[in-house]
Amino acid sequence: MMGNNAVAQTGAEVSRPRIWAIGGGKGGVGKSFISSSMGQALAKAGKRVVVVDLDLGGANLHTSLGIRGTEFTLSDYLNGKVTDINRVAGVTDIDRLRLISGASDTLNIANIKYFQKAKLLRNLAHLDTDYVILDLGAGTSFNTLDFFIHADHGLVSVTPDPGSVENTYRFLKCVFIRQLRAVPEQTREMIQQVLMHRRKGGRKAGSLADFLEDITRQKPSVAASIRQELDTLKLHIIVNQVMEPEDTELGRSIQMVCSRYFGTKIGYLGFLHHDRMVLKSLQQRRPFLSTFPQSRLAIHIDTLVASLMAQDDD
Amino acid sequence: MTDFPDMPKGRFVVDVAQQDYYQVLRLSPAASKLDVINAYRRAKLAFRADSLAVYSLYGKDDLEKIRKQIDQAYAVLSDHEQRQVYDVKRGFVAPRCDNDGKIEAETVQDDVTDIGAADGSAGDNVVDLRTKQHLRCDPDPELERRIKAADAYPGDFLREVRESRGVSLRDIAAFTRISIGYLQAIEAEDAACLPAVAYLKGYLAQYAAEIGLEPHRVVQGYPPLAD
Ligand SMILES: Nc1ncnc2c1ncn2[C@@H]1O[C@H](COP(=O)(O)OP(=O)(O)OP(=O)(O)O)[C@@H](O)[C@H]1O
Ligand SMILES: [Mg+2]
């Protein structure tokens, strides 16, 4: 399905778009940069893409794409002013790439109503496109987590500093707990206790992996359903803003630590270098990837996108 | 839920899940020698005391325990004989020799892959050529015996071990980031090209780990370092 323009056929035979969400607990780790760059890379690869700015309240994805705004915004859709979700996806300067802007004076991701969230979640699949990319705001509000969990792939951006790593683990813990909302309440509470209570005086609340091991012996059926829920999440780490050679190992280390601590598999997609030209392109209001397509950073982004696309194909 | 009472803090400090050596290194039982070495290096890197990746999850004592497990797992899995005994004990492979009647066949499972499926991080999105190679060269028993007995590790012996394991200098250089020139100098014992002693020890140890030798023994037994 390779439509040349954004207007394409609708119909039952049209397969639903793949949804990728970019999250991560901390602000400024590159979620918006990665969302917009991956969107450009997909468009360059011939796919139709809609990037959605879900950082309501702090929306700036249009800036990363080098445009001022779009005719309609997400709030027009959520408030019912525009009824067709495809109409709020505005064109950008890049072929095949459209944007649903989150710019709004009143909306905040934490305070959109349940029915609004449900409507949006349901209708993302009706976007007439090949890929949808969700740029999530910082933090771990329920709404943010729900969009993240809803996606086919959840990408977590982390930068090589302790604060970002800590936030990443906190974000992942919240994702797991949210994902496990269907397990029996008492078990879920125990998991929450295991994951959330802080280490005090050198004492450690054991890992989720150990808890799962324990519960497997005591309640095998509960354990099986927990594992199944966790396994449906397709999570990937991206290390962004790499400057030192040793930081290139951080992603694999995090992957190893996650495997041991959470007892569930997390993918490592790759790392992205810090590149001064990102700021330059922002200042010139030009999207980085299409302005510097030959740069090391752009090529790495192309590679990440290609490897994630390959995972969807099989 | 009476059979599942309130859990006191610290109840799971004992890592019950981590008793399996393959699990500890996040490997499948089919892992090659080189996979074992790579996984060991990665694990040591991930869980070292100043690792950024453990921040906020593990404390100093936990890390020390984990590193001990990693070392222990590596000691067994990197030693051909110990690994074989361990594999049979765990039921990963059938005992090789029929004349060894003590090893019971009842624990043996045919299906190695379903154990491998539990492996967490080794299966990757990013293609890692090194781990895809599966260079499990047939060990040369004579050489293994000489390695066991060795207390000196001259350069030509190191090269012999490396070549028998099917590891190229280029592989080692790519992974350790030690220049090929230094690696060649190590094998040639070329004093003119070797780095300063402090660096040499570090390089030698990394090189040794890459070819599955005990780093500290190699450093001790490398002739140019003997006074
Ligand atoms: N690899 C990179 N090299 C150079 N600059 C980068 C890189 N990645 C991101 N940046 C810059 O870092 C800043 C923060 O990035 P970005 O706005 O994408 O983060 P964010 O996670 O979306 O933040 P927020 O949580 O506030 O939405 C931006 O100015 C962006 O251009
Ligand atoms: Mg942002």
Image (cartoon, rainbow, N blue to C red):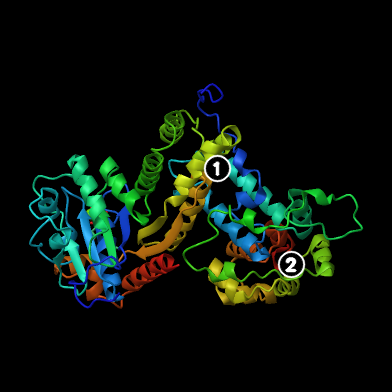
Mark 1 residue type: Leu
Residue A303 seen anywhere in this rendered image of the structure: yes
Q: Residue at x 67, y 53 (%)?
A: B74
Task: Pinpoint residue B157: horizontal percent, then vertical percent.
Answer: 76, 72
Q: Are tags 1 and 2 found on a single chain? A: yes
| SS at circle 2 | helix
Q: Quadrant of the C terminus of chain A?
A: bottom left
**Label 1: few (<14), some (14–19) or many (≥20) C-alpha neighbours in 10 Å:** some
Describe residue B213's horizontal placement relative to residue A167 as left or right: right
Q: Residue at x 44, y 36 (%)?
A: A183
**Label 2: few (<14), some (14–19) or many (≥20) C-alpha neighbours in 10 Å:** some
Q: Chain of mark 2?
A: B
Q: Most extreme residue toward the top, as rendered?
A: B2
Residue B189 seen anywhere in this rendered image of the structure: no
Mark 2 residue type: Pro
Viewer-side residue, A220 vs B174: A220
Task: Pinpoint residue B191: horizontal percent, then vertical percent.
Answer: 65, 74
Q: Residue at x 55, y 42 (%)?
A: B63
Q: Which residue is mark 2?
A: B223
Q: Separation of disc 1 and disc 2 at Cα?
A: 35 Å
Describe residue B106's horizontal placement relative to residue B168 as left or right: right
Q: Quadrant of the N terminus of chain A?
A: bottom left
Q: Which residue is mark 1?
A: B63
| SS at circle 1 | helix
